[in-house]
Amino acid sequence: MKNQEIARALHEISVLLEVEGKDKFKPRAYARAARSIESLGEDVEAVARRGELESIPGIGKAIAKKIEEYLDTGTISHLEKLRKQIPIKVTELESIPGVGPKTIKLLYDNLKITDLESLEEALNAGKLEGLPRLGAKSIAQIAEGISLVRGGMSRTLLAEAMDVASRLVEYLKQSVSITQIDVAGSLRRRRETVGDIDILVNSPSPEQVAAAFVSYPEIGEVIVKGDTKVSIRLKSRLQVDLRLLPAESYGAGLQYFTGSKDHNVRLRALAQQKKLKLNEYGLFRGDTAIAGRHEEDIYDQLGLQFIPPELREDHGEVEAAQADQIPALVELSDIRGDLHSHTDQTDGSNTLEEMIEAAVQLGHEYLCVSDHTKNLTVANGMDESRILKRIDEIDEINNSGRWPIRVLKGAEVDILPNGELDIDDSVLSQLEVVTVSVHTMMRMDRAAMTERVCTALESKYAHILGHPTGRLLLKRPGIDIDLEDVFEVAKKNNVVMEVNSYPQRLDLDAGNIRLALRSGLKIAINTDAHKTFELDNMRYGIFQARRGWATASDVINTRSVKDLLPLLKK
Ligand code: DGT
Ligand code: CA
Ligand code: CA
Ligand code: ZN
């Protein structure tokens, strides 16, 4: 789906027009159109196909044409022209927290700053001081933002990398004859972010695979082109390593290039103990390969249970495999429903009916609608009376039998700074699933924050702790909190930990999922969908839960609604 790409392109036009400064209204129109596409509840391409682009709020004839141009050609000529005139790297600069369109214009007008590098130079040379409308506080924020971006810049979110990788794999399969193709590296291990994409191929004509690879339409540059390894950088800056492997060592290559490095070190040592040798070509006794074609054989010959890629981090999986104690990890097909979703009642993009319909399409047995509550004014949070109305609405839907799904009455209730919930108990008691979350005042110190969350978990009506750390990958660290204390209090109060599947969140992380499970807690893998198609993000939460060694029985929403609801009783 191209909604986000198009929103980004329209937004970029708005910023460049603003910098150009010729017209006051056009930049605003483009900014509004960008926001509108960003929060659109369906595929913009489908809307275009129906010829209904102009029915989207903020989209007039001119902008609709540009959207169509993008859908046809992958670019907008107006944007290309602006980029030539004004060589600002808008997306790069805006990735810095604290830098928006106004600041970009200011920096360009006064200092000709066009990208992260020139901004950093100006900052270090003290040139930002003395600029009009840029106080010491803003400068400090920019400095902090730059170091954050620098730290995360070389990595890409798993969800984004998976999309890129599957498009590329499809392209290669369409272009040349391929016997086997796999994604390896951190992407196969489902790390939450990846440094690059690693692809392995076995083909009767490796030269043609290499040739097709370097002619991929999304390519930026070729980094290396050898006989067995070709590396490219895509236009998006993401690097892709392609390795061409012979069939007889394909499995060994897959094992080796899946990593992790630490996991491989352990396996090689284990091979040595058995007087064997393990490398990317196979497992050898003397000069004879005893495994190499299939990855499973490597583990088998080493006396190990097969280890799912998600566990290959040298976090105890080798010992577990030796003892036949690799758990049966939870799978997407185990999931029966979703316990965290939003609608246009608050900050979601789709109606209640649209969300329900989408959940039905996914085959869910239940969907909990959990819109925000009143403390979260930026999201138009619901007060008690709106929640009561919502409850009636859901009762009516369930009674009507219109959809083969049970809609659960829920809310994502704000945890106030003092640990109280922002909704009255008399209303909370009428909800079936109450998720409690921290959304405001996120910079409290560790002791106060831990106290705040623990107090909330003691509420008689708190069932699930939503996105427990609040971190946003590559953007902001989580709240400062002692999760061990939280887990202990959660255990006492029968509170479930959420594994939020939102690609930028993936919260709890793998290490803390494992810790939570060891503390005797259960988890709920939820999408926190704000749009119908985001209900499909469940898989990313599943990956994260697998990396946290979770089995189906650790996850409450693998159960039928009948078995699930009693688990939430306090
Ligand atoms: P990334 O790309 O930073 O997210 O992480 P990986 O794990 O995908 O790392 P990458 O792409 O450098 O290499 C892929 C796998 O290949 C890695 O997990 C293990 C293997 N590998 C690559 N280079 C080495 C090496 O120098 N030594 C060992 N033992 N393994 C390596
Ligand atoms: Ca990699
Ligand atoms: Ca690599
Ligand atoms: Zn939330």
Image (cartoon, rainbow, N blue to C red):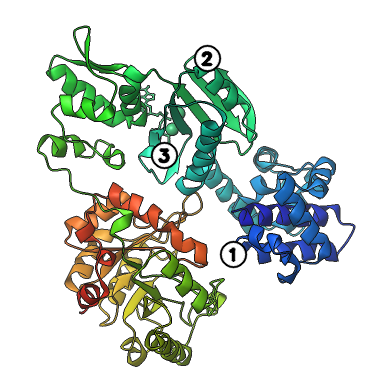
As shown in the figure, which amino acid type bears the numbered disc 3? Leu
Above or below residue 175? Residue 359 is below
Ligand 1 shows up in the quarter that is: top left
- Image quadrant holding the C terminus, namely bottom left
Q: How dense is the environment of label 1, judged by Cα within 10 Å: few (below 14), some, or many (20 and up)?
A: some
Residue 500 image-quadrant placement: bottom left
Given residues 161 and 399, the one toward you in this image is 399
- Within 8 Å of ligand 2, the CB of disc 3? yes
Above or below residue 536? Residue 167 is above
Mark 3 sits on what residue?
A: 187
Residue in the image at 50% along x and 13% along y: 227
- Dot 1: element: loop
In the drawing, does residue 180 fall left or right of residue 482?
Answer: right
Residue in the image at 44% along x and 57% along y: 537
Instruction: Give the mark nearer the N terminus: 3 vs 1.
Output: 1
Residue 499 image-quadrant placement: bottom left
Mark 2 sits on what residue?
A: 226
Mark 1 sits on what residue?
A: 42
Residue at the extreme top of the image, as rendered: 287
In the drawing, does residue 402 fall left or right of residue 142?
Answer: left
Residue 208: image location, x then y, percent = 55, 20
Measured in 3D between alpha carbons, the distance from the residue under mark 3 to the one under mark 1, in whole angstroms, is: 28 Å
- Dot 2: element: loop
Q: Nearer the viewer, mark 3 or mark 1?
A: 1
Residue in the image at 58% along x and 22% along y: 223
Above or below residue 336? Residue 108 is above
In the drawing, does residue 277 fall left or right of residue 253?
Answer: left
Instruction: Give the mark nearer the N terminus: 1 vs 2.
Output: 1
